[in-house]
Amino acid sequence: MTDQAVDTDGGRLSAHPAAADHFLGRTRELKGLRADIERAGLDTLSGRKAPRARVLLIAGRPGSGRTALAEELVRKVAERYPDGVLRARLSEPDGTPVPIERTARELLAALEVQAPAGAAEDDLTEKLRAALAGRRVLLLLDDAAGAEQVDALLPDAPDCLVVAVSGGPLTGIADVRPCTLGGLDTKSAVELLTRYTGSVRITVDPRSAESLAEACQGHPAALTLAGGWLASRPQAAVSDLAKRMHTDAAPGAEGADSTPLARVFRLVHDQLAGPAARILRLLSLAPAGLIDPHTASALAGCSVGAARAALDEFVLL
């Protein structure tokens, strides 16, 4: 449902990011980000050579498509960085910041540079900057918890580019070019719904599809969950879900003060069978990674078969 995925490989170096088959919309944001790569920085304007890599920031709430946008940008400009693309995730799935020392070691390993055992954080980040000197690398730092994480890993190489993904501003890093994400435009939001519902249900009632997209405020994770709910209920009308979402958002309603994602999640949860709803609530306690029927069974105290049936229902969503 969100733009985040657990990456068990740590730092990775790749020459060609995977094509984004499912990416849509964000034309204006992509154009602005690509323009920011070319725009003269403060050092250039003052007649000095830029001392460090340029930093582009993509900021937005989880589920806003911020990582998807970052990967699409990387895909489009990667050929300009012949020494490859480095990727690192700076937060654990539960939001805990990854220690800078660990990230630096992972990035050095991706560059096939040996890091001394027991080396301090400053020594490791200095070694990383030395390894990147003279290279033209694109560094994608996903889910940054704060500016200090990004700043510690910035290459002293103006020919490198850093794309940072975060929930908010990176105050303290000079000349950051921010791109703050809102919802998808209506056309893209409806297209995202169509991927789950099929084209027929949207074409026969396009206004209801637009109304549902509006109720979800174009939020990709909310639209994905709403589309999955409709896909698992072929007889349900798009108009019924749109009305329910608007009703829940009306002043005085139970979900009026919540986000679109919270409202559609509540709707999905309330319509699950009792055992499945209980398992869904308990999944937040599971270890990071993929959840199998045995893990769900242990959490919920039910049979493996019941857990498997519940997980199959979640997959439809």
Image: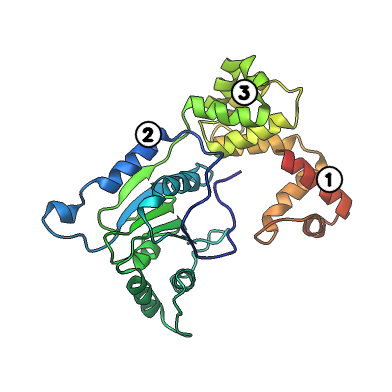
Q: Secondary structure at mark 2?
A: helix
**Of callouts 1 and 3, which one flags the residue occurring earlier in the amino acid sequence?**
3
Question: Mark 1: which amino acid?
Answer: Ala
Q: Quadrant of the N terminus?
A: top right
Q: Are circles 1 and 3 on residues that touch, CB within 8 Å? A: no
- When asked about the image quadrant of residue 9, the answer is bottom right
Question: What residue sits 45% from the left and 80% below the top?
Answer: 115
Question: What residue sits 39% from the left and 53% below the top?
Answer: 163
Closer-to-camera residue (156/300): 156
Residue 27 x/y as whole percent:
41, 34
Closer-to-camera residue (12/303): 12
- In three-dimensional space, the C-alpha distance between marks 1 and 3, rounded to whole angstroms, equals 28 Å
For residue 245, the mark is none
Question: Mark 2: which amino acid?
Answer: Arg
Q: Which residue is mark 3?
A: 242
- When asked about the image quadrant of residue 233, the answer is top right
Circle 3 packing at 10 Å, graded few (<14), some (14-19), many (20+), is many
Q: Which residue is mark 2?
A: 28
265 vs 55, left or right, is: right
58 vs 238, left or right, is: left
Q: Which residue is mark 1?
A: 309
Q: Secondary structure at mark 3?
A: helix
Examine the rendered structure and indicate whether residue 193 appears above or below residue 311: above
Residue 263 visible to an observer of this rendering: no
Residue 313 x/y as whole percent:
77, 41
Examine the rendered structure and indicate whether residue 185 appears above or below residue 16: above
Residue 22 x/y as whole percent:
56, 39
**Of callouts 3 and 2, which one flags the residue occurring earlier in the amino acid sequence?**
2
Examine the rendered structure and indicate whether residue 72 appears above or below residue 49: above
Question: Mark 3: which amino acid?
Answer: Ala
